[in-house]
Image (tube, rainbow, N blue to C red):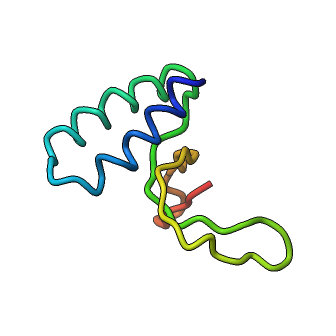
């Protein structure tokens, strides 16, 4: 778990540097750790808000883990669950 957290923090840093190759390689390494530790989750880059009634923006963007939406077709409509 600590390796994933550290990896996400490093992705935040690399995202703003001028090295897409380093970012891409590090993203692949962290994604592999995530798939192993948390099947069904992936990495996203998202704006963060606090939880609760106020839902105020933290005014930051960060790499986070999110569940992968499971998609299937039903009656010719795309259903996301």
User: What x and y, as percent, mark residue 45?
Assistant: 43, 57
Q: Residue furthest top?
A: 36
Question: What residue is rendered at 15% in x and 54% in y?
Answer: 18
Where residue 24 sits, quadrant-wise, is top left
Left or right side of 51 for 9: left
Task: Name the quarter where the N terminus is drawn.
Answer: top right
> What residue is drawn where x is 45% and y is 52%?
44
Which residue is at 52% across, 45% downward?
Answer: 68
Where residue 7 appears, as percent x and y from the top left, is 43, 33
Question: Which quadrant is home to the C terminus?
Answer: bottom right
Vertical placement of residue 51 versus 53, above or below: above
In the figure, is residue 19 to the left or right of 2?
left
Quarter of the image where one finds residue 48: bottom right
> In the picture, residue 55 is in which quadrant?
bottom right
Percent of width and height locating residue 67: 58, 45
Percent x, y of residue 15? 30, 52
Task: Name the side, left or right, on which 79 lies relative to 8.
Answer: right
Judging depth in this view, the residue of 48 and 16 nearest the camera is 16
In this rendering, is residue 26 above or below 36? below
> Is 60 located above or below residue 33 in the figure?
below
- Residue at the extreme right: 53
């Amino acid at each position: 778990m600590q390796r994933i957290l550290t990896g996400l923090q490093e992705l935040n840093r690399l995202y703003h540097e001028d090295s897409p190759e380093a970012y891409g390689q590090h993203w692949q390494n962290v994604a592999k750790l995530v798939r192993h530790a948390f099947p069904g989750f992936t990495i996203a880059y998202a704006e963060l808000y606090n939880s609760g009634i106020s839902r105020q923006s933290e005014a930051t963007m960060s790499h986070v883990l999110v569940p992968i939406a499971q998609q299937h077709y039903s009656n010719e409509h795309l259903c996301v669950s």
